[in-house]
Image (cartoon, rainbow, N blue to C red):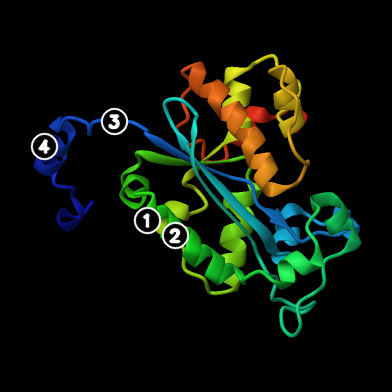
Amino acid sequence: MAAAERPDLAALTIAHEQPPAAAVTVEHVLLFDFEGTCDASDAGLSRLQQCALHEIIEFPALWLDAHTGAVRGTFHEYVRPTEGADGDGAARPLSTFCTNLTGITQEQVDSASPLAEVVSRFLQWVASCGLTEALADGSALLIAHGGWDLGDQLPIEAARKQLALPAWLGSRTYSDLKVLFALEYSGASSTSLRGMLQALGLEPEGRAHSGIDDCRNLARVVEWLISRGADLGHTHRAGEMLRGRRA
């Protein structure tokens, strides 16, 4: 190694001797469960291929107390798709399959705002709840059920639509509820929403695949995890921890 390339050993020693930063206590949770456009023909596509094709049409988020699981606030809007079959032109209408699955109608999305406006209002809501600084310093945590919502669909669609997202809403800054549940409930045979509720002896409430109803049911699982003292820290889509489990 040339002299110019040698590391500063003194600086490294000083850095090593510095005490570690104090752990940040998580005080708040933001829980997400989006719904998106979909079609029966998606079965032959990978998840990332589906993300490149489809758009978010329901954007719910619950603000939970990280110590009790109590719901402290709700954000919920439908989202108007804006892309045609080739990414331009008139937006594709919702498929019958999509409406039957999610309960979301063409009329609901036609009267909604596009994603950029919905995200802007979501960020305003986050600020009005006093959570912007907490999300930046790690005392507020994002949770989603699986990797699709925050890990794939939102960042992929935002990039495609040239929509800038704050750093805390990035694809590696959330915890996967499937992983959290599997780590805490080792006997669970499924980490699907229904499977988790069944394992806890809870009946689903509302309509399956309604984003806001799914969020409320997922919040019951988060509340159980909190009551167990589970670590809700970032899982960074550690899907390998669930290998062999039925999702």
Which residue carries the number 1 mark? 127
- Splitting the image into 4 quarters, where does residue 202 fall? top right
> Tag 3's secondary structure?
loop
Give the amino acid at mark 2: Leu
Q: In this view, does 44 lie above or below 204?
A: below
> Tag 1's secondary structure?
helix
Q: Position of residue 181 (x, y in %)?
A: 61, 25
Q: Is residue 53 visible?
A: no
Query: What residue is at 73 percent from the left and 47 percent from the top?
Result: 210
For this view, does 44 lie left or right of residue 199? right
- Circle 4 packing at 10 Å, graded few (<14), some (14-19), many (20+), is few
Which residue carries the number 3 mark? 23
Which numbered disc, 4 or 1, marks the residue that appears first in the sequence? Answer: 4
- Circle 3 packing at 10 Å, graded few (<14), some (14-19), many (20+), is few
* Measured Cα–Cα span from mark 4 to mark 2: 40 Å
Which numbered disc, 3 or 1, marks the residue that appears first in the sequence? Answer: 3
Which numbered disc, 4 or 3, marks the residue that appears first in the sequence? Answer: 4
Which residue carries the number 2 mark? 123
Which residue carries the number 4 mark? 14
